[in-house]
Amino acid sequence: DAKTTQPNSMESNEEEPVHLPCNHSTISGTDYIHWYRQLPSQGPEYVIHGLTSNVNNRMASLAIAEDRKSSTLILHRATLRDAAVYYCILRASGNTPLVFGKGTRLSVIA
Amino acid sequence: GAVVSQHPSWVICKSGTSVKIECRSLDFQATTMFWYRQFPKQSLMLMATSNEGSKATYEQGVEKDKFLINHASLTLSTLTVTSAHPEDSSFYICSARGGLYSYEQYFGPGTRLTVT
């Protein structure tokens, strides 16, 4: 699976939007972009995933660049419960396991 | 959504003993299960992949005789850490795939192992 690059950490104020970037310049045409997050002392949880088009769900939005070499996870209104490590992961097919990088540690300030 | 449980949530054991961790998919049949390990301040590291009824496939550097994985049914996988040592102390997380959205991986809450 292709590699991703994320900032080590980011900070946001509560109730403000957060844009978490991810670079994946070596992405292949069949790679899906997945985002998971891990709250302290818990297992990761699914946030969102996409292939080419922007995606929205109840948790977040995923904006994918036209060339697919980068993507941005958008939390529309950060809450204290959104403080977590966010992982951007590329996966070629549904049969391969998720391989985690270092992720971005998001801190939310009240 | 699909739920994956782990038992126990934490365990303390003495050096040289073995510890078994259970991973269950509660509301779906998991055709594939994964085991990850996470040291403090680090990311998750994939240890092995197991398909129901088959032998597990271990990642490079993971000792298969030390970390025994059994996936005997579509809802249960176990990880046994044999002859545990303090360096095996870690957060062990299982993940399962299957069900309606078979591409998605669902994660358990993790098991904190401390070896004294």
Image (cartoon, grey):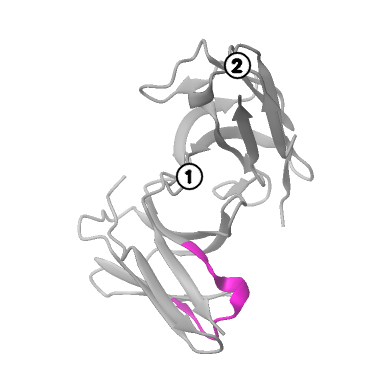
- Percent of width and height locating residue B71: 66, 23
Q: Amino acid at mark 2?
A: Ser
- Is disc 2 placed on a helix, strand or loop? loop
Q: Write down the chain letter for disc 2.
A: B
How many labels, in total? 2
Give yes or no for contact between labels 2 and 1 (Cβ–Cβ under 8 Å): no
Q: What residue did someone put label 2 on?
A: B15
The single residue placed furthest to the bottom in the displayed view is: A16
Position of A21 with respect to A83 (left or right) is left
- Percent of width and height locating residue A55: 48, 74
Q: What residue did someone put label 1 on?
A: B40
Q: Write down the chain letter for disc 1.
A: B
Q: Residue at x 26, y 75 (%)?
A: A66
Q: Amino acid at mark 1?
A: Pro
Magenta-highlighted residues:
A74-85
Disc 2 residue crowd, few under 14, some 14–19, many 20+, Cα 10 Å:
some
Query: Which label's residue is closer to the chain start, 2 or 1?
Result: 2
